[in-house]
């Protein structure tokens, strides 16, 4: 029997006996990380919900975060390192990469362990066996569906390591790599659990940050005394509004000048939500930091909070930002009058240009616009429907919570970031710290899931400032609770849609009146709600369109960017309203869509008034895959055929919607890339693009290999390092393939030009007689020269210098991805439970550059959207405190929640502007599930579900079963 | 925060550890103690790993389940009735099922317990180190201090059904129900209705049991309504009182219907 404070434990890890000393309460996951098994991760505050802490314990999978290390005494532990010998993937790991599920990949090592255990236990597992084995695994990126493919490949590859299986449809026979299934370039590193994420880069001895969060939703700090905390041994620094820069900025990583107001400092004297920053402690250890938080004395002046749009717009509502207003350009004439009653403790708001704000009335932004004559349009209508749709606050919930590690390198500040926007991050931090950008180096590490939430500066400012001020290395990793409540979420919105149509279904007028709740700050407050209009209204052709957007401040948890931006909410409202119109017209919904939908060759005039913080421009639709998507989807779901369940309580129904997104922001986005020829003729790409797990690096490598007629294995890539790679606005607005991809392609073309020029000299043949041929050869009419020979010629002592192709990419051309989603649901009218029997997402992303990764992103997007539609919502009590602070309470979908028949179909179109015809794919798929499920539920049970989530309780209420 | 981790090698040693360490708690798989939201904090824990309570056996007309048997071991055992396997599967995560123990699930006495409604319906008895034999709900209603040695389930003469409803597969259960019914060939002689999610712990709906036995609640809607009228759940983030009343009635009625079907 043992006791006492330090325990010796003997265990076997991956077959090797180990002796460890542990405190009795030390968590097993923490012990394993402490001794070097850093792939055993904790991202759910030890709730055992995500599986990232999976190890095999005597051969059985368990969650190490739920165990104390002492339990491991005398036992066998296996981590992902047990699956591989050195640098070569095991059969399960390579199967996961080939199946396309290794994307943000934070949980990929855990998935590999779980599937290995399954196949050891059941060599030929059923679908139910697979779902059971993966029941512990949270995967936000790829929607679980491709795990079934991975298991199928793995079980065959265990017998035959050379086994290959086609894991996705392939496109473009004229191309070698683009459109083909190829291994993701960082797949092996991620699935084997090698160092890849920010937390893997933290140096021993680094300080940690812990934050004192506001207990009130709306309050002033009357006084704050940090003396006791500061003098605690081991405390390095305590930060409050009193000793941090008085610099106002936006957390939104958008192109400068941003449409988002600069309405907050690093620390404010006013507190805007439960969880807002009061003080940060930087300390030698987490324990000391937590202890120090308890020694900070704060006196609050509590104010009445505002949580809803209705409360925010009410007469005499408490003012969230009674700040001094400043405009860089376009100040209103009555600015002095507006500032007359501003409160000093609230600081100021700086606008780069007007965004229709009136913060003293809680209006963060507003905009109106339209085409044609809306009144005349409604007068011309035979049928008018007008409905209001409500959507709550939902969270991005990436596997990897927000995290940053900062350190000094001489006189320069180095930021190891999990970010979608390395360059915006550098610019914003430079402004906050009051230093020039050359003093800061941002290294974008692998991102364990972003989905928009990492388009923000969430905690990097605090760590950067602490490091800059103290010279110490500083690490900050949000807990799951912090991430749920203190990062960013999707804006709650209330959307009123009014549609007018002729009896034959022709739309005569479309009106969208959108009110959004931006919460405490105005990051993305203009553009997210506008996007709800700009990514939904252009799906239908109508001469008379109008929209009004008004956005309100409140004291809910912060909002911001989230995959799809505003589109999922605009799409839900408009697509459902179209279904309601179809019912009024007594017309088949699909027929109504067909009659009014966008088509190739049309000019989208409405975009003239839907620019993102600038004047918009009409856009010509040059490619649109809706013809094929709707036709194929209708065939797959057997549209028009009524299904029966055989159970009188269970009603079956079908639904359809169409969706769209953009491919980056023409006129606003900017990408850059270099392609360098190395000494042996192989190639190095330096891309500014930020691969956030979606496979952008693989896109760039494929494009370069394709242009330069070489093998992908001859091309390596470094991306998102501000010191080494060219500027890129970042990974948001579905810009990766279109902007960063086009930049890489153009850089390869620039290098190709130089290769041809050099070869022309070497072969003494004119350029026009030369061509690049695979593999890595320039061939003329008389002879040929290899890339290796060209490299030697250019880089030798008398050479002309290393060949480098550089390009930046900007454009005014727009490429829109489109899609049609179909689903079939079973509604249990006794329990209110909605079961999705079939879900088919047919997506046009032009040429799918990485088909299997594109499919994975679509599955992931659809399942997120299913989660939002059926389960997820961030709840708060009457004081603004979060009621569901863990992923289980919040309700993220697991593998058991996927539709029974879940299919993605890529619909090929050849877009003239995208690289080799590629359009975006990353965001669009989150726009479909909520409206298509609601439509199918109506078809099944005759009820309209006009607010998310469609809980059993709401269904029962709509059915009149409960009051 | 655990400061002392004791590893007794016998039941007697475990009980002695408990006696000499006031405030200490027994520690099975640890899932209910180690997770971040746990309220079962103790500075001294007594691991039950080595005390030999890991067996599932049958004999003398009953099934005996050692208190440190995991939920997954229940599912994997050929001796365990399917309905109890189904209840163990209400804990969605296989990782957690590999860790969480039967004794831990009973000891925690949570209202959303996966096992307690089913064990109650199966008339399971808890055998403790004090030689006490208590029903599962009796044990939960007490101070839950005595170490659970085993849970013993009498040979089933009737049928049992369980139901759970939650938003998603892994969400917290809103309501969990279990019903058992036994007959003697001419009529029904025993009914147990156990429900979790209504208030603290798991409760038996005795008035409903009596009315089912008396034949008053043959009609499904009448039964559902009777249950809904009887229970008084609280509104919370999982649902309103009205919803819980209604859905509790539906789940009990569904269990009863399944039992009646099974008795045919």
Image (cartoon, coloured by chain):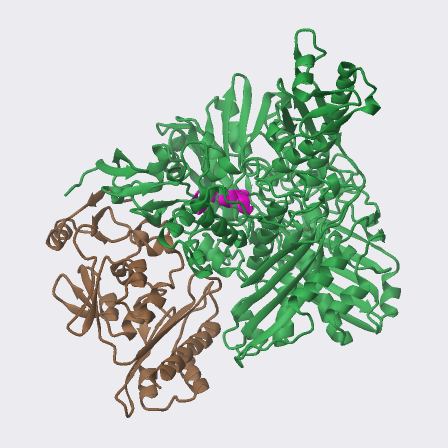
Chain colours: A green, B brown
Residue A21 on image: x %, y %: 25, 34
Camera-nearest residue between A146 and A375: A146
Camera-nearest residue between A793 and A353: A793
The part of the chain drawn in magenta is: A95-111
Furthest-bottom residue in view?
Answer: B186
Residue A953 on image: x %, y %: 52, 70
Q: Is residue A673 left or right of residue A897?
A: right
Furthest-front residue in view?
Answer: A782
Who's the residue at 32% across and 76% down the image?
B160
Determine which quarter of the picture holds residue A390: bottom right
Q: Is residue B97 left or right of residue A239?
A: left
Residue B238 in magenta stretch: no
Residue B240 on image: x %, y %: 48, 69
Quarter containing the C terminus of chain B: bottom left
Quarter containing the N terminus of chain B: top left
Q: Is residue A443 visible?
A: yes
Furthest-top residue in view?
Answer: A798
Who's the residue at 33% across and 71% down the image?
B83
Asked if A753 appears above or below B57 in the picture, the reply is above
Residue A100 in magenta stretch: yes
């Amino acid at each position: 029997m043992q006791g006492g404070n330090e325990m010796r434990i003997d265990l076997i890890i991956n077959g090797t006996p180990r002796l460890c000393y542990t405190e009795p309460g030390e968590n097993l996951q923490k012990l394993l990380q402490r001794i070097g098994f850093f792939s055993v991760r904790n991202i759910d505050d030890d709730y055992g919900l995500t599986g990232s802490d999976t190890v095999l314990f005597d051969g059985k999978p368990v969650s190490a975060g739920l165990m104390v290390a002492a339990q491991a005494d005398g036992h066998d532990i296996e981590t992902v390192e047990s699956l591989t010998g050195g640098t070569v993937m095991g059969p399960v790991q390579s199967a996961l990469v080939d199946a396309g599920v290794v994307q943000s990949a934070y949980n990929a090592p855990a998935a590999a362990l779980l599937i290995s255990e399954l196949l050891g236990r059941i060599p030929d597992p059923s679908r139910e066996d697979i779902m059971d084995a993966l029941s512990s695994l949270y995967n936000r990126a790829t929607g679980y569906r491709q795990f079934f493919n991975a298991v199928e490949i793995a079980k065959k590859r265990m017998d035959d390591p050379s086994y290959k299986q086609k894991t996705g449809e392939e496109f473009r026979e004229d191309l070698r790599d683009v459109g083909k299934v190829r291994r993701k370039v960082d797949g092996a590193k991620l699935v084997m659990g090698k160092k890849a994420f920010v937390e893997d880069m933290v140096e021993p001895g680094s300080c940690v940050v812990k934050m004192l969060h506001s207990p009130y939703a709306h309050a002033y700090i009357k006084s704050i005394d940090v003396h006791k905390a500061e003098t605690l041994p081991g405390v390095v620094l305590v930060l409050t509004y009193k000793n941090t820069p008085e610099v106002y900025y936006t957390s939104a990583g958008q192109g400068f000048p941003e449409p988002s107001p600069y309405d907050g400092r690093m620390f404010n004297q006013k507190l805007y939500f439960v969880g807002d920053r009061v003080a940060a402690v930087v300390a030698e250890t987490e324990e000391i930091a937590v202890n120090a938080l308890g020694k900070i004395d704060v006196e609050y002046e509590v104010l009445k909070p505002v949580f809803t749009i209705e409360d925010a717009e009410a007469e005499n509502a408490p003012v969230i930002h009674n700040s001094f207003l400043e405009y860089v350009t376009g100040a209103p004439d009555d600015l002095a009058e507006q500032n007359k009653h501003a409160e000093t403790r609230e600081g100021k708001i700086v606008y780069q240009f007007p965004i229709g704000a009136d913060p003293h009335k809680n209006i963060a932004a507003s905009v109106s616009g339209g085409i044609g004559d809306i009144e005349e349009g409604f007068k011309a209508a035979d049928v008018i429907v007008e409905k209001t749709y409500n959507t709550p606050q939902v969270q991005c919930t990436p596997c990897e919570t927000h995290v940053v590690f900062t350190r000094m390198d001489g006189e320069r500040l180095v930021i190891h970031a999990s970010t979608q926007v390395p360059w915006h991050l550098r610019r914003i931090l430079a402004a906050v710290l009051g230093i020039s950008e050359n003093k800061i180096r941002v290294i974008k590490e692998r991102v364990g899931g972003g989905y928009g939430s990492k388009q923000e500066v969430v905690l990097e400012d605090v760590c950067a400032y602490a490091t800059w001020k103290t010279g110490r290395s500083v690490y900050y990793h949000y807990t799951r609770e912090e991430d749920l409540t203190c990062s960013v979420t999707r804006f709650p919105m209330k959307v009123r849609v009014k549609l007018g149509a002729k009896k034959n279904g022709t739309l005569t007028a479309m009106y969208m009146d959108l009110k959004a709740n931006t919460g405490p700050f105005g990051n993305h407050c203009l553009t997210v709600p506008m996007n709800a209009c700009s990514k939904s209204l252009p799906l239908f052709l109508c001469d008379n369109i109008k929209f009004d957007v008004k956005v309100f401040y409140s004291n809910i948890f912060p909002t911001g960017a989230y995959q799809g931006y505003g589109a999922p909410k605009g799409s839900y409202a408009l697509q459902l309203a179209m279904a309601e119109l179809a019912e009024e017209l007594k017309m088949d919904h699909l027929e109504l869509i067909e009659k009014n939908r966008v088509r190739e060759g049309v000019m989208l005039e409405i975009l003239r008034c839907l620019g993102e913080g600038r004047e918009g421009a009409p856009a010509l639709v040059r490619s649109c895959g809706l013809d094929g998507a709707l036709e194929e989807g209708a065939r797959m779901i057997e549209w028009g055929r009524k299904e029966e369940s055989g159970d009188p309580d269970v009603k079956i129904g079908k639904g359809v919607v169409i969706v769209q997104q953009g491919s980056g922001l023409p006129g606003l986005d900017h990408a850059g890339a270099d392609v360098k020829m190395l000494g042996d003729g192989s190639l190095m790409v330096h891309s500014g693009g930020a691969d956030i797990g979606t496979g952008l690096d693989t896109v760039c490598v494929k494009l370069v290999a394709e242009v330069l007629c070489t093998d992908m294995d001859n091309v390596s890539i470094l991306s998102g390092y501000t010191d080494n790679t060219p500027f890129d606005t970042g990974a948001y607005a579905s810009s990766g393939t279109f902007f960063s991809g086009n930049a890489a392609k153009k850089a390869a073309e620039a290098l190709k030009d130089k290769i041809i020029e050099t070869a022309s000299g070497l072969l003494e043949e004119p350029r026009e007689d030369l061509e690049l041929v695979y593999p890595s050869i320039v061939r003329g009419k008389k002879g040929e020269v290899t890339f290796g020979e060209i490299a030697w010629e250019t880089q030798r002592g008398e050479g002309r210098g290393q060949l480098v192709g550089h390009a930046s990419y900007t454009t005014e051309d727009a490429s829109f991805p489109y899609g049609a989603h179909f689903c079939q649901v079973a509604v249990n009218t006794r329990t209110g439970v909605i079961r999705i029997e079939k879900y088919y997402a047919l997506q046009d992303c032009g040429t799918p550059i990485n088909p299997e990764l594109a499919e994975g992103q679509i599955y992931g997007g659809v399942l997120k959207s299913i989660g939002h539609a059926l389960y997820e919502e961030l709840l708060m009590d009457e004081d603004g405190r979060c009621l569901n602070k863990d992923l289980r309470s919040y309700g993220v979908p697991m593998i058991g929640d996927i539709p029974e028949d879940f299919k993605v179909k890529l619909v090929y179109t050849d877009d003239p502007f995208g690289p080799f015809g590629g359009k975006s794919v990353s965001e669009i798929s989150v726009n479909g599930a909520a409206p298509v499920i609601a439509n199918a539920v109506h078809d099944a049970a005759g009820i309209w579900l006009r607010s998310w989530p469609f809980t059993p309780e709401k269904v029962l209420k709509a059915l009149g079963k409960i009051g | 925060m655990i400061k002392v981790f004791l590893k007794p090698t016998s039941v007697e040693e475990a009980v002695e550890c408990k006696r000499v360490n006031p405030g200490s708690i027994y520690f099975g798989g640890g899932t209910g103690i180690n997770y971040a939201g746990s309220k079962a904090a103790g500075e001294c824990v007594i691991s039950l790993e080595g005390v030999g309570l890991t067996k599932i056996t049958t004999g003398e007309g009953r099934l005996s389940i050692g208190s440190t048997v995991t939920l997954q071991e229940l599912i994997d055992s050929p001796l365990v009735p399917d309905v109890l396997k189904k209840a163990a599967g209400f804990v969605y995560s296989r990782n957690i099922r590999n860790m969480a123990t039967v004794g831990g699930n009973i000891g925690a006495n949570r209202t959303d317990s996966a096992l307690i409604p089913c064990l109650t319906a199966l008339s399971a008895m808890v055998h403790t180190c004090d030689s006490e034999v208590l029903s599962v709900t009796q044990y939960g209603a007490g101070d839950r201090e005595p170490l659970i040695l085993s849970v013993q389930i009498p040979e089933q003469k009737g049928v049992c059904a369980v139901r759970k409803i939650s938003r998603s597969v892994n969400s917290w259960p809103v309501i969990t129900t279990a019903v058992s019914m036994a007959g003697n060939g001419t009529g029904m002689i025993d009914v147990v209705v156990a429900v979790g999610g209504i208030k603290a712990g798991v409760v038996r709906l005795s008035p409903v049991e009596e009315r089912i036995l008396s034949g008053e609640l043959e009609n499904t809607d009448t039964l559902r309504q009777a249950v809904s009228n009887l229970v008084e759940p609280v509104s919370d983030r999982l649902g309103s009182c009205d919803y819980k009343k209604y859905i509790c009635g539906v789940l009990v009625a569904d269990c009863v219907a399944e039992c009646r079907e099974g008795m045919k």
